[in-house]
Amino acid sequence: MPSTSLLYLPELGQLALIAAFVIACFQVLIPLAGVHLRQPWLMGYARSLAVGQTVFLLASLGFLTSCFLLDDFSVAYVAANSNTLLPVPYKVSAVWGAHEGSLLLWITMLGGWGAAVALFSRSLPLDMVARVLSVMGMVSVGFILFTLETSNPFARVLPSAPLEGADLNPLLQDFGLIVHPPTLY
């Protein structure tokens, strides 16, 4: 069990995911309003919102990874997919080894591509960038909402957390799982 100062990592991950959701909602609305109203200053928010969403998604994924590395079995997803004897590389890959974590990885990668569009599209017309990033925000809104509502990787097993986790599926304890999902996305 993690020390008292680290007990709130799952809640911080959940808050970061909620913040990414709120930013994604703004990423949908503000740039499209700018396009509709022909206001470049509103369209200009698309880039910073896309990057902001990615920062919070990366934080959320980082908090979940920390829960695995610290063997925080009060998190249901960690308890179901890890144990104290699992080697560190497999603890990291267990983050995306099942449904909830895989969705979080996918959303984070989607956010990363949105940030890439935001950062490397300076030569494109502002209204086009605003539309593209707004549509990417729409996709993020859907997937983040689905994750928060039905596939939350930060759900707790309280008040009685198990002392040991169930273990990562033996079929997934392979080097391929470490590299395959991140490179696939």
Image (cartoon, grey):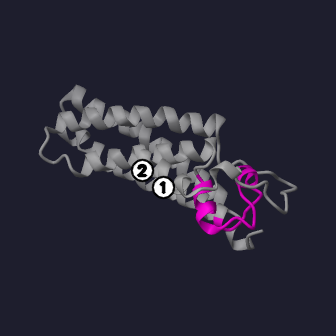
Name the residue located 34 percent from the left edge and 46 percent from the top edge.
113
Reading the image, the residue beneath label 1 is 179
- Magenta-colored stretch includes residue 162: no
- Magenta-colored stretch includes residue 89: yes
Q: Quadrant of residue 139?
A: top left
Question: Along the horizontal axis of the image, is 71 left or right of 146?
Answer: right
Give, as a three-letter code, the residue at label 1.
Val
Label pair 1/2, CB-CB below 8 angstroms:
yes
- In the rendered image, which quarter contains the N terminus? bottom right
Relative depth, front residue between 150 and 87? 87
**Residue 175 % position (x, y):** 55, 58
| Residue 20 visible in the displayed image | no
Reading the image, the residue beneath label 2 is 183
Name the residue located 76 percent from the left edge and 59 percent from the top edge.
73
Instruction: Report how far apart the C-alphas of labels 1 and 2 lie in the structure.
Output: 6 Å
Give, as a three-letter code, the residue at label 2.
Thr
Range shown magenta: 69-95
